[in-house]
C-alpha cells in the first residue's frame, strides 16, 4: 500500500561539487539551502541583495551585478530614521547612509567579481505578486513598511516573466556558456495574498519556469521543492507553528532530496567528511586545557590537512582558526 504521493526528480539535473562557484538568489528558501551548501563547503554567494521574492526584483538585481553597479545616496531613501534601498532587503538598512551604501556596494562588488567564475545560478521564486512604486513605476523588492498608498500591487504574467528572463539568460549564457541555471519555486505560501491568489501566483511561476526550460533545454533546470512539500509531504506536521513555513524536518527532507539529485558522488563524500569535522569541533570537553583534548584537536587538524591535500579548493580557514585558538588556551 502506497501511503504518499512520490515526487520524481528528473535524472538529468546538473551535478554540483565544492569546486563549482554558485550564486543563490531569491526567497528565504534560497537562503536556507544556501546556508546548507555553505556548511557543506560549497563556494557560494547567497542572496547578495538579501531575500528577494518576485522574479522582476531578482532579475533586476542580477542585471546590476552583471553591470557592476555602484550605489550612491541618490539610490537610497530615508524612512522612519533608517536609510533603505528599494532594491534590497531590510537587512541592509541602517541609521547611516554611509553604512547602508557600504553594505550594499560591498556585496555587489563581491558578486560582480565572482560573476565570470560562476558555474551554477540557483534562483528561487517566491511570488508573482509585485509592488510598483507609483512615482517611478518600478517594481520594488521591499516596501520597507511604507504606506500601501505608495504602491500599486499586481501579479506578473507568465509572458512578462518569460520575456524578462529570456533576455537576461541569453546575455548571461553568451558571457558564460558553461552556466547552468537551476530554478525552484518556494514552497512557502504567501497567505497574506489569500490562498487562491497564492495558488495563482505559484502557478504563474511554475508555468514561466517551464517555458524557460523549453527555451534553454541545455542550461535551465527545475528542482521540485514546491511539489515535494505540498505533494509528497502533504501534512501539517511538516510545517512550523505558523502553518506556513516548512518545519526543520521538512527542510531537511527537501535538502536530502536535493543532495541526492544535484550533488556529485565525490561531493557527497566531502560533505560527509566535513560534517564529521564539524561534529568533532562541536564536542565540549570536560577539561579544555587537558593534553588529551589537545591531542583530539590535533586529530581534527590532521583530518583537515588530509582533506585539503585531496581537495585544495576546500576552505577550512574557520575550522583551523578554532583549533588554533583552542590549542593556545
Image (spheres, grey):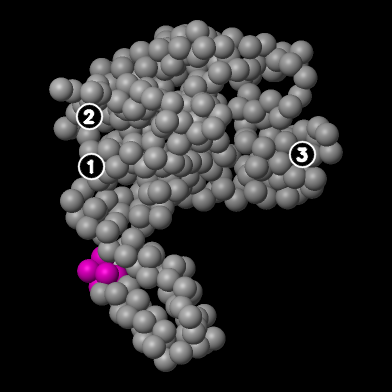
Residue closer to the observer: 75 or 49:
49
| SS class, disc 2 | loop
Q: Is 197 drawn above or below residue 122 in the view shown?
A: above
**Residue, far front:** 1
Image-quadrant location for residue 223: top left
| SS class, disc 3 | strand
Residue 314 place in picture, x, y as percent: 33, 63
Tell me whether circle 2 and circle 1 mark residues in contact (CB < 8 Å): yes
Answer yes or no: is residue 282 visible. yes
Return the mark for residue 9: 2
The residue that disc 1 covers is: 260
Whichever of labels 2 and 1 marks the residue nearer the N terminus, that label is 2
Nearest to viewer (mark 3 / mark 1): 1
Image-quadrant location for residue 175: top left
Q: Which residue is drawn at the image coordinates 22% and 34% (left, top)? A: 13
Image-quadrant location for residue 149: top right
Q: Is 242 drawn above or below residue 267 in the view shown?
A: above
The residue that disc 3 covers is: 83
Residue 112 place in picture, x, y as percent: 49, 45
Q: Which residue is drawn at the image coordinates 79% and 39% (left, top)? A: 82
Residue closer to the observer: 188 or 293:
293
Q: Residues within 10 Å of mark 2 (few under 14, many from 20)?
A: some
Q: Which residues are magenta?
A: 307-311
Amino acid at each position: 500500500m502506497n501511503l504518499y504521493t512520490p515526487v520524481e526528480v528528473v535524472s538529468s539535473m546538473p551535478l554540483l561539487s565544492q569546486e563549482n562557484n554558485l550564486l543563490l538568489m531569491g526567497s528565504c528558501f534560497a537562503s536556507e539551502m544556501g546556508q546548507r551548501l555553505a556548511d557543506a563547503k560549497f563556494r557560494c554567494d547567497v542572496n547578495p541583495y538579501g531575500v528577494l521574492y518576485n522574479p522582476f526584483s531578482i532579475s533586476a538585481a542580477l542585471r546590476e551585478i552583471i553591470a557592476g553597479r555602484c550605489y550612491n545616496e541618490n539610490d537610497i531613501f530615508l524612512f522612519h530614521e533608517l536609510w533603505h534601498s528599494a532594491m534590497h532587503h531590510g537587512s541592509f538598512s541602517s541609521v547611516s547612509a554611509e553604512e547602508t551604501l557600504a553594505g550594499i556596494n560591498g556585496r555587489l562588488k563581491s558578486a560582480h567579481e565572482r560573476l565570470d567564475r560562476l558555474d551554477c545560478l540557483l534562483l528561487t521564486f517566491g511570488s508573482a505578486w509585485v509592488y510598483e512604486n507609483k512615482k517611478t513605476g518600478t517594481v520594488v523588492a521591499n516596501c520597507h513598511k511604507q504606506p500601501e498608498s505608495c504602491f500599486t500591487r499586481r501579479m506578473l504574467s507568465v509572458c512578462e516573466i518569460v520575456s524578462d528572463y529570456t533576455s537576461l539568460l541569453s546575455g548571461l549564457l553568451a558571457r558564460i556558456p558553461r552556466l547552468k541555471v537551476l530554478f525552484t519555486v518556494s514552497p512557502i505560501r504567501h497567505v497574506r495574498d489569500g490562498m487562491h491568489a497564492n495558488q495563482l501566483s505559484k502557478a504563474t511561476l511554475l508555468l514561466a519556469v517551464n517555458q524557460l526550460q523549453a527555451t534553454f533545454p541545455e542550461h535551465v533546470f527545475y528542482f521540485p521543492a514546491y511539489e515535494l512539500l505540498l505533494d509528497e509531504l502533504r501534512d501539517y506536521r511538516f510545517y512550523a507553528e505558523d502553518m506556513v513555513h516548512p518545519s526543520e524536518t521538512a527542510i531537511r527532507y527537501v535538502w536530502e532530496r536535493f543532495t541526492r539529485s544535484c550533488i556529485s558522488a565525490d561531493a557527497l563524500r566531502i560533505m560527509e567528511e566535513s560534517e564529521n569535522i564539524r561534529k568533532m569541533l562541536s564536542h565540549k570537553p570536560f577539561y579544555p586545557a587537558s593534553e588529551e583534548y589537545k591531542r583530539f584537536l590535533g586529530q581534527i587538524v590532521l583530518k583537515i590537512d588530509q582533506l585539503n591535500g585531496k581537495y585544495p579548493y576546500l576552505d577550512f580557514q574557520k575550522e583551523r582558526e578554532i583549533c588554533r585558538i583552542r590549542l593556545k588556551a
